[in-house]
Amino acid sequence: MPIEALSKKDLEEKAPASRVHPEYVSFLTSARLGTGGRLYVAKEGVSRQSVKNRLKAAAVVTGKNIKFLRSPSEQVVFQIVE
């Protein structure tokens, strides 16, 4: 598999901020320390890991820290932490 060279412009277009889902950002923006949320993987239409990655990207954009809590495989549960 050959390596594909990417320009700065290509890398900026592939930056995590460009893939952040607005509804995740909106939720995290209004969430307060100690609160959290639950997402159902089936409703999101992607894998559990993709849901977590989306949340992590939205947390970076909003400047929040999140912690994932143990939950059944069909759910992703998280909390806003310091």
Image (spheres, rainbow, N blue to C red):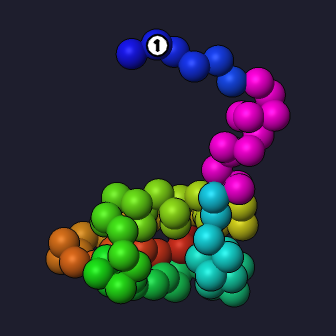
Picture quarter with the C terminus: bottom right
Q: Residue at x 42, y 74 (%)?
A: 78
Picture quarter with the N terminus: top left
Q: Residue at x 64, y 50 (%)?
A: 16
Image: magenta residue range:
7-18
Q: Which residue is mark 1?
A: 2
**Residue 10 among magenta residues:** yes
Q: Position of residue 70 (x, y in %)?
A: 24, 70
Answer with left or right where residue 70 lies relative to residue 16. Answer: left
- The crowd level at tag 1 (other Cα within 10 Å; few <14, some 14-19, many 20+) is few
Q: Residue at x 76, y 24 (%)?
A: 7
Foreground: 46 or 68?
Answer: 46
Answer with left or right where residue 2 lies relative to residue 6. Answer: left
Q: Position of residue 28 (x, y in %)?
A: 63, 78
Q: Position of residue 38 (x, y in %)?
A: 39, 84
Answer with left or right where residue 63 lies relative to residue 76. Answer: right
Image quadrant where residue 76 sits = bottom left
Image quadrant where residue 8 sits = top right
Foreground: 41 or 72?
Answer: 41
